[in-house]
Image: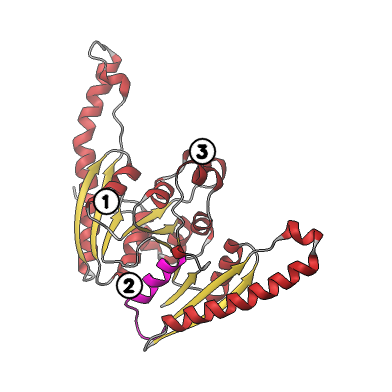
Amino acid sequence: MRILLATDFSHYADTARSLVKRLVLPAGSHIRVVNAIEPITTVAMFAPAAILTLTEAAEAEAKAEVAKAAKDLERPGVTADAVVGFGRAADVLIDECDSFKPDLLIVGSRGRGGIATSVLGSVSAELVDRAPCPVLVARRDTLSKVILAEDGSAYAAAGGRAIAALAPFATAEVRVVSVVDVPFPVMFADPTATGTAVEAFRAYEDAMPKLRETHAGYAHTRAQTLAANGIRVSSEQREGDAASEIIAAAREQSADCVVIGSRGQTGFRRLMLGSVARSVLFHAPCSVLVIHERVAEQKAPEAARAPVTAPA
């Protein structure tokens, strides 16, 4: 197994390194620790000689630190090396993904929330959008309890395959959660409503049992698949806003990690509306492993891309 570990030497990065150090990895695994030295372009315009000196000092210090981190991660059967790159952190890490071809990219999380995250984004979010492999944003140093988000799609199936295929999840306790995300229309709550509104409310009521059954089937079927791979697993169906319910399940189960597929919305739509994966990424109280739409398509053979079919 090949793991790319990003570090900026912060305590968030220390959590990610601690997680990697505790992972149970197969013999022959290789870990690469990467640090990016970002350019100081504005100051460089006025004092290029001073910036050159600072950059050289920063490079020497960074190389010493990443080498130390890599040595700390080595163990019998697991090797590690270190790389220091120059440029934007996300660009450096994506370049390393292209050359190192990791099975998993692990980064720390600054855990920003609210409007700062929504408007500015973060390195973690950019990596989730761009990386050619699953991205684990580490907020805890264990992977003992895992929530797997399931909605019957090919993207959710990729999350299930990641748990079955990645060695660190082999001993995890997994709970598969499928959410019926059909909000109750406020207009239907009017007790004086008649005609079309009443008919729509009845249609809503009639649809809910089938939706509950379908999503319970998604979760149960995925759980059966994981159990067949030797994973300890249970399942549940919930109702409400999908991101909020997945986060609530993580809190209730004291989960170490949420695993979720992403359809990879980008640009203005992602900034304004967000997505379930993005909301979970920024607001979950635990680590989050995101399998991007592009990764799901590249990693899965045609037969495995099909969504889960709930039992009739």
Residue 283: x and y in percent read 39, 48
Q: Secondary structure at mark 1?
A: helix
- Quarter of the image where one finds residue 199: top left
- Residue 81 in view, yes or no: yes
Residue that mark 3 sits on = 272
Give the amino acid type for the residue marked by disc 1 in the picture: Arg
Residue that mark 1 sits on = 251
Between 142 and 28, the one lying in front of the other is: 142
In-image side of 107 versus 47 (left or right): left
Pointers 3 and 1 in contact (C-beta within 8 Å): no
Give the amino acid type for the residue marked by disc 2 in the picture: Pro
Q: Which residues are magenta?
A: 13-29
In the image, is residue 27 part of the stretch drawn in magenta? yes
Residue 249: x and y in percent read 25, 49
Which residue reaches farthest bottom? 76
In the image, is residue 285 part of the stretch drawn in magenta? no
Q: Nearer the viewer, mark 1 or mark 2?
A: 1
Q: Secondary structure at mark 2?
A: helix
Pointers 1 and 2 in contact (C-beta within 8 Å): no
Vertical comparison of 310 with 135: above or below: above
- Quarter of the image where one finds residue 12: bottom left
Q: Earlier in the sequence, mark 1 or mark 2?
A: 2
Between 123 and 13, the one lying in front of the other is: 13
Please tell me which residue is depicted at 21% across the width and 38% down the height of the picture: 210
The quarter of the image holding the N terminus is: bottom left
In three-dimensional space, the C-alpha distance between marks 1 and 2, rounded to whole angstroms, equals 21 Å
Q: Earlier in the sequence, mark 2 or mark 3?
A: 2
Vertical comparison of 100 with 173: above or below: below
